[in-house]
Amino acid sequence: MTGYDRTVGADGRTRISALETLMNMLSVVGDGGGELERQAAALNVGTVRTYYPHLSDDEAGKRIATLRARVQAVMGELKKGSTITAQAASNTRQLVSTYVNSSALFPGTFGTGRSPAGQIDLIRAILRGEIVVISLPAQDYPDFAAMIYTMILLDLQNAVATLRARKLAVSQYLALDTGVADSTPWPPFIVQIEELGSAVNSASAEALINLLNKSADMGIRVVASTQALADVRQVDDGKGVWLDRLLAQVDHLFALQLNTEADDEIVCGFSGKVTKQFATNETAVSNNRLRIFTGASESKMVRGSEQQDTRIPFGTTQALDRDSWEMVYVTKAPKLTAVHTTAPEGPNNWYEIIEMVPVFEPELGYNPFAGDPELIDATREAARTTAITLNEELAKRSSKLFEIVDGVTEKADIEPVSAVTAVSSEDSTAFDAFDDAAGPEGDHFTHVDRRSEDDFDREPAAAEPSVWDRL
């Protein structure tokens, strides 16, 4: 509310970066205390009403008192040095300081948008069914990608906790019945994670497990993909314990051709064991007393022997035809099966190989803005209208969306182990040493956003109006 995140840098034009803002806010030393304490002390009714003009003077004063109390509690934990909060903040600040001027971040990265419609708010995205795309440079900057990945998962976990507290209010506002198990007044929110093993460390792995454990009833559906399960096994140094915990949360498993026997055994084992009958031939041997003209003849009998075996036999996924896009699909909802399009599973029909139909994408270099000018203009205008409407909606105190995303009732739901290991943890002495560390010198963020306040050309196309617009 003090506008610190929009502070102008040394060049007099450019805002400081979001990482620099975070690093300064985590500081607990300096004249008058840390930056967070100084910003809390600088709050007054005028500044609050600048950002929340709908509040009365009395309401603004109450909000200031609440925020100062929260800041005081947090700073009390930070100054103890040995607490979980203090160690997490110290380690995070130390790690952020190494990236604040890193080549991993181009100028202006993580800067705040000029309007609410240009900012990422996960709660708002879930309520309105928005599309959020986050691309992490896991190959070039693996440590940085893992850090941001962890923060995103923890933020999403907190968003789930906030929505859980507001579920009834949203249901009543939309007059929807959510008495059915796992039903929500907002549409399902799909979290798709590509290349799962490339940006996972112990902290992000724990955050993902916690998200899976706590988000299903709030409509969060996680879809993860990886080139090889071996990458995921390396999260806990090849022990495979975290992979077992992950698979315990999985309801649907798709596997294309796999290269290793170990990965094949995991998929086949996931399909579960059943009683199979294996056919055997019985052969009879006949001879006379003098052992003359001894011969053998088949009895023409076939006997079946029952054995416990996996639904999908070992070696199946390694033998899949990649050119034909073959895959196997195992589901545990509503019941465990690997058969989907044929007769009910049973003898000789315990699994099936499914051939996918490829979807042909536009050719490389396709430019959607090189098409019909009228369609492009109409799409941009729809996006601009949606963004402006969203800005106006967030300014309405009567809006349910504003009530949820303004932060007053925001919930925190982070496991201590995730908070501590969210970054590379050093010993507790790093906290005291880090307090004296100087921040980055100079202003290296020279990007200037000169777009006007109502320029939303980069906003996605608007969807058709629906009941969600009432949020």
Image (cartoon, grey):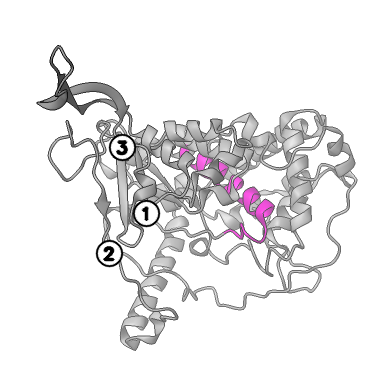
Q: Nearer the viewer, residue 376 or 421?
A: 421
Left/right of residue 180 with respect to residue 267 in the rendered view: left
Looking at the image, which residue is at 41% across and 73% down? 384
State how far apart marks 1 and 3 are (Cα): 37 Å
Q: Earlier in the sequence, mark 2 or mark 3?
A: 3
Q: Which residues are magenta?
A: 136-160
Residue 129 numbered tag: 1
Q: Which residue is mark 2?
A: 464
List x then y, in percent, for residue 166. Answer: 41, 37
Q: Which residue is mark 3?
A: 312
Query: Residue 282's image quarter?
Result: top left
Query: Eyeballing the image, is 29 above or below 269?
Result: below
Secondary structure of the residue carrying numbered label 3: loop
Residue 150's place in the image compared with 297, above or below, is below
Precedes in sequence: disc 2 or disc 1: 1
Residue at 49% x, 44% y: name it: 229
Where is residue 55 shown, x and y percent of the image? 53, 49
Residue at the extreme left? 300
Name the mark nearer the viewer: 1 or 3.
3
Q: Please tell me which residue lies in front, 408 or 227.
A: 227
Q: Label 2, secondary structure: give it.
A: loop
Q: Position of residue 155 (x, y in %)?
A: 55, 44
Mark-to-mark CA distance, 2 and 3:
44 Å
**Residue appearing at x 58%, y 42% in the figure:** 58
Give the class, few, some or many, for how many residues have Cα within 10 Å of label 3's Cα (few <14, many ≥20).
many
The first of marks 1 and 3 along the sequence is 1
What amino acid is found at the position of numbered circle 1 in the picture?
Gly
Q: Which of labels 2 and 3 is toward the front?
A: 3
